[in-house]
Amino acid sequence: MSKNSPYIRPCLIINNYFIGDLIVIIPITTKYKQKFEKVFYKLPIKSNISSFLMLNQITVISKKRLVRKIYIENKKISTIIFEEIIDKMKNLL
């Protein structure tokens, strides 16, 4: 176990071209809570584990904090899925 492993968390990068080394991300979790249904978005991943975006946890971090890349299916999320995520985020406001 490396010194970074307890702190590694999966995330979806929303905006890679922010100021300097900063990027906008949404954390990914496998824990889904029904009572907070409107803040979760289920990622369409073909695997035995369901993954959800936590839309209320959107944040800005440094690119230097990224450890490794993990791709979803076709290496990029389709524009349709991205638009669904943005629409759901707008509904939260």
Image: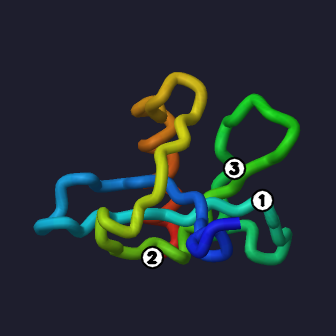
- Report the mark closest to the observer, 2 or 3: 3
**What residue is shown at x 69% (from left), y 49% (from top)?**
42
Q: Earlier along the polypeptide chain: callout 2 or callout 3?
A: 3
Residue 10 occupies which quadrant of the picture? bottom right
CA–CA distance between discs 1 and 3? 9 Å
Res 61 quadrant in image: bottom left
SS type, badge 2: loop
- Residue 50: percent from left, percent from top: 80, 47
For label 1, the crowd category at 10 Å Cα-Cα, with few meaning under 14, some 14 to 19 and many 20 or more, is few
Image marks 2 and 1: residues in contact by CB distance under 8 Å:
no
The amino acid type of the residue labelled 2 equals Leu
Q: Could you tell which of marks 2 and 1 lies nearer the N-terminus?
A: 1
Residue 24 image offset from top left, x and y in percent: 34, 65
Pointer 2 residue: 93
Cα–Cα gap, marks 2 and 1: 24 Å
Q: Nearer the viewer, mark 2 or mark 1?
A: 1
Quadrant for the C terminus, please.
bottom left
At 57% from the left edge and 34% from the top edge, which residue is drawn? Answer: 72
Which residue type carries mark 1?
Thr
The residue furthest left is 20
Q: Read off the residue under disc 1.
A: 30
The residue drawn where x is 54% and y is 76% is: 56
Q: Amino acid at mark 3?
A: Lys
| Closer mark to the observer between disc 1 and disc 3 | 1
Q: Earlier in the sequence, mark 1 or mark 3?
A: 1
Q: Is residue 30 above or below residue 62?
A: above
